[in-house]
Amino acid sequence: MNNRTNFYRDEIFRLLGQERYLLAFDVETTGLQPDAQIIQFAGVLYEMGKEKKFTLTERERMNIYIRPRTALPKRITELTGLTNTFLADYPYEEEAFPLIRAFLSQEGIYCGYNVAFDIGKIRALYERQGFLFHQRKYLDVLEMARDCIPKDKIEKYNLSSVSSYLNTTQGLDYHNAQDDISATARCFIRLLNMYIQAWREERGRKKEKLVLSYCYYWVNRYQKSMQRVIAVTTGGNLYYDAIKKQWGINKKESLKIEDVDLDFIQIQCLSKYKCQDMDELVGLLKKKKLSQ
């Protein structure tokens, strides 16, 4: 967690302190496009135990297959194992929707892996059925993994790679919504314990609070994937990687990333440019650079 702030960790600690239940869910769909239909919805209601150690106790489980209006693309069948023949025996989404809506209406924090994708598909489902999806705070285990697992230790931040790194893969088949939830819950417990351990280690450790002067957007003209916000400070320059969404320091600087209070830097960046998050700041500074 040396190259990311503690913002997400602190937000998760706050959410877990407020709620008793966790609503974990996952969907399989006909594709990635905005109008892709859900073909499997799986959800588990967990009760959280928070006394001597954090636990998740399963209280309710549901798994629904949904017959799509159009034939499945071959690549979706290859990815999920679901076929048109199999799904032909299941109801269309208008029949399955009341069950999904009832599950998601229960008390608890929404949770998933790259859960914004699932929420987007669920919101589209609600709209097709004439309902408004009331979004609540959610917990994304993908962001926890990015916080806790160094980039050089893992090939990808997908669920199967993270599960393998955390040794939580036993008996699971990925790209099945039910197993993806189990994998997500296992990873969540491991990563939460890593958060807690890091928090304990950081207590009493003094980090350098650098004062921000200004920020600017920079992109490598030969490698467009290298896009950064450069933060010019009193103690040297830091950068925020817009693609990897993490902080770093060039080797030529005398600073070490683990010695810098990144929360303090990021708060100054957002405050100075009146932005809600770093994505907004990247967009603002990029637009400013292009207009020059």
Image (cartoon, grey):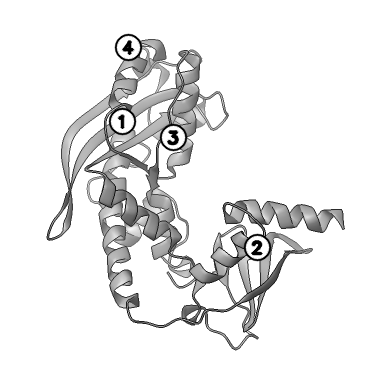
Q: Which residue is mark 2?
A: 272
Pick out the residue farthest to the left.
52
Badge nearest the viewer, 3 or 4: 3
207 vs 87: above or below = below
Kindly identify the amino acid type of the residue bearing the numbered disc 2.
Answer: Lys
Residue 43: give x, y in percent of width and height: 29, 32
Q: Is residue 235 left or right of residue 180?
A: right
Q: Earlier in the sequence, mark 1 or mark 4?
A: 1
Kindly identify the amino acid type of the residue bearing the numbered disc 3.
Answer: Asp
Residue 42: mark = 1
- Please tell me how crowded label 1 is: few (under 14), some (14-19), or many (20+) other residues with Cα within 10 Å: many
Residue 292: give x, y in percent of width and height: 87, 58
Identified at 27% across, 26% down, the residue is 63
Q: Which residue is mark 3?
A: 118
What's the distance in space between the residues labelled 2 and 4, CA to CA?
57 Å
For the residue pair 107 and 122, the one nearer the viewer reads as 107
Discs 2, 1 touching: Cβ within 8 Å: no
The local secondary structure at tag 2 comes to helix
Residue 17: give x, y in percent of width and height: 26, 52
Discs 3, 4 touching: Cβ within 8 Å: no
Pick out the residue farthest to the bottom.
254
Q: Earlier in the sequence, mark 3 or mark 1?
A: 1
Badge nearest the viewer, 3 or 2: 2
Quadrant of the image occupied by residue 175: top left
- Please tell me how crowded label 3 is: few (under 14), some (14-19), or many (20+) other residues with Cα within 10 Å: some
Residue 89: mark = 4
